[in-house]
Image: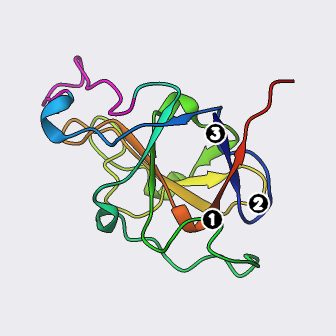
Amino acid sequence: MIVFDCAVCGHRLSAPVREVPPPADGEVWTPLDSPVDPCPPRMAPGTFARDPDPGRTAWGPPPKSFRGSRAGHEPGVDLLLSPGDLVGTTRIRGRWSGCCGPGGTDGPNLARAGCRAEVGLWTGDCYTWLDVALDGRLTRPRPHTDG
């Protein structure tokens, strides 16, 4: 198990998770056009996967306060998590638009609560997967130890 930390401030971004293969489109629930019956998360709780389509998210440049390498991930590697596995993040209100939930069309909409680095994108509208993608450039994995 590992946890992901913010590469800008070093604080946690995720609960302990284990890597699994990314879900194929046919293996998960199909998005519905109903806010009453939303899609379940694309990723099971406690898991993460490397995004098979990292180009779907247009990340801006890393924040000026970011000093370091690519934080352990190659450029273009984004990480898919279940929304319930996020820790210490907050919504970027001006980018949380959609009809039934965040559509993700306005760019990163999750920030690290302390340093405000734009670390992720939450989608969960009626026409999207319920999904969280963390910017692989701004995350640092570390082994999770009990206690």
Labelled pair 1, 3 in contact (Cβ < 8 Å) = no
Q: Tell me the residue that label 2 is attached to.
A: 115
Q: Position of residue 135 (x, y in %)?
A: 51, 61
Residue type, label 1: Gly
Name above or below for residue 65 compared with residue 41: below
Q: Please report whichever mark, 1 or 3, sits nearer to the chain's N-terminal start.
A: 3
Distance, label 1 to label 3, CA atoms, is 16 Å
Q: Look at the numbered disc 2 and give the secondary structure of its residue.
A: loop
Q: Amino acid at mark 2?
A: Cys
The answer for how far apart the CA atoms under marks 2 and 1 are is 20 Å
Toward the right, the furthest residue is 147
Q: Amino acid at mark 3?
A: Ser
For disc 1, the neighbor class at 10 Å (few under 14, some 14 to 19, many from 20) is some
Relative side of 93 to 138, left or right: left
Q: Residue at x 46, y 33 (%)?
A: 82
**Residue nearer the viewer, 94 or 15:** 15
Magenta span covers which residues?
29-43
Find residue 127 and report its image quarter.
top left
Q: Count of labels shown?
A: 3
Q: Secondary structure at mark 1?
A: loop
Residue drawn at (32%, 43%), measured in percent from left and top? 22
Return the residue at label 3. 14
Q: Which is nearer the N-term, disc 2 or disc 1? A: 1
Q: Name which residue lies at 31% across and 24% down.
A: 40
Residue 135 on the magenta span: no
Instruction: Choose top left, top right, bottom left or bottom right for residue 100.
Output: top left
Residues 49 and 57: in front is 49
Front residue (pair 19, 115): 19
